Image: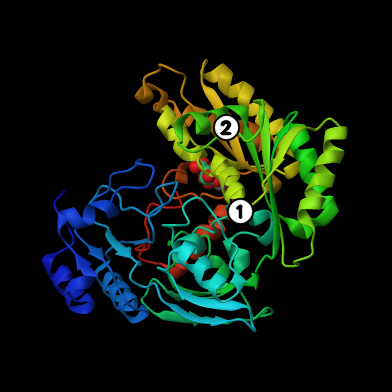
Amino acid sequence: MPDTPVSPTLLDRLSAILGPRGLLTDPADIAPHLTDWRGLYQGASPAVARPASTEEVAAVVRLCAETRTPLVPQGGNTSMVGGAVPDESGRHLVLALTRMNRIREIDTADMTMTVEAGLVLKAAQDAAAEAGCLFPLSLGAEGTATIGGVLSTNAGGNTTVRYGNARELMLGLEAVLPDGSVWNGLRRLRKDNTGYALRHLLVGAEGTLGVVTAAVLRLFPRPRDAAVAFCAVADEDAALALFRRFRDRDDSAVRAFEYMSGTGVDLAVKHIEGVALPLESRADHYVLVDLASSRPDAGLRDMAEAVLAEAMEAGEVADAAIAANEAQAQKIWRIREEHPEAQKREGASVKNDVSVPVSKVPEMIRRCSAALAALIPGSRPVPFGHIGDGNIHMNLEQPEGMDPAAFLARSHDIMDCVNAVVRDLGGSFSAEHGIGRLKTDMMEAWRGGPELAAMQAIKRALDPHGIMNPGKVLP
Ligand code: MLT
Ligand code: ZN
């Protein structure tokens, strides 16, 4: 560890605030908090603060403000962009929120749930289900990611197409601001036009403007009818045409609509036990359609059959399987959800979490795939993801037999190559994974000018000493 500028006195004061369970200083206990989920960064820190209440968070932040100690808020540590780990300097204190995991209230009349930041997303979904409701945010890391983390990154995931991103699922927030003051904005109002929406500034700020400690989340009626289909489609245009068919038939029933390439599905089948193609023959393009309704008599299976029959007639769909039960539906979802893991097992891969207007997705996939194949001959594009949101993970798998390190050394060229196409199509270089540390150097080129200047002014106003998650989001 580098010489630690976090003084022993500071650690003593933290220990007095947090008690023995609330402060980790043993390097073995700290280690899991220092590396990110993707293994891109190896940070250093003398301690991990683990407050158990909002008051304790506030006391820690006040102490850090007084001593100008940088703080890195951390939830489940599943950031895809190194947003939740400290840098290598050893000057940053990690603030882990995972002990703050209480459900404060569920209100089925207001359809809200008030929960603490460290609550794991899956636990929030389960609590909503137990109350007979749905909390719809759903993503691969939901068994580990926390509510504070998904709000701080405005996470998207699989159900954005129907329910919106994390931002749209939040009505109120409680947060500790960078001076250590506690802001209680736990209002559960559908309408509240009272000046700047501070809650929306904190959502997506990735911990750079304060620490989210609790939130009021929106609940929905639980689904009583559902249907999941896995379809082989002719090409990227056919995937989009099928999305439009379902959307036009019943917008509110489309809970998720995911694209997968033949390469990605092949890798999932090859590497993940229990994953199998539910169709007779292989295709180059697939989609997963997930329909749900709170109406028990919605007839979604019949609807899926009818729409797929029309699409087959039109030559868009070659073959399709509709899950006969929940177990089959889960098997179909695994093909999609195991995409990241399968890519990892195949070798080195580079992620490009990009978005374009929905209508431009087919062109984006085709142009990026061609440009990437020209950039690194033999490399394998694995585009997959949330086509209904215009958000595709335009990932690239290394060529077979290439040295993984040599491939990863080209990461920035690969990202630049994809981003050039995305920019030309009016898209974004980070659709749902955020900026973190990985993409700060892209902010100037993409958001420079008045937009970035306004962000920097907000940062200076709220965090004049720059102690909140330094080195993240802003260049
Ligand atoms: C997903 O949707 O599975 C993740 O956001 C994508 C990824 O691992 O690139
Ligand atoms: Zn995704």
Query: Residue at point 50% right, 58% down?
Result: 153
Q: Residue at x 60, y 47 (%)?
A: 328
Vertical side of 352 occupied by 452: above or below:
below
Q: Nearer the viewer, residue 43 or 293?
A: 293
Q: Amino acid at mark 2?
A: Val
Front in this rendered view, residue 36 or 46:
36
In the rendered view, would you say 410 is above or below 57? above
Tell me the residue at 49%/60% (across/down). Answer: 150
- Label for residue 265? 2
Q: Position of residue 20 (x, y in %)?
A: 17, 73
Q: Which of the two marks, 2 or 1, is nearer to us in this view?
A: 1
Q: Residue furthest front?
A: 324
Determine crowd level at label 2: few under 14, some 14-19, many 20+ residues with C-alpha closer than 10 A.
many
Give how far across and how far down residue 237 sits, in percent: 77, 33
Q: Amino acid at mark 1?
A: Glu
| Residue at x 69%, y 79% (from the top left corner) | 191
Residue 412 locus on image (x, y percent)? 46, 31
Q: Which residue is mark 1?
A: 326
* Nearer-N-terminus badge (2/1): 2
| Closer to us: 199 or 229 | 229
- Report the side of 174 relative to 323 (left or right): left
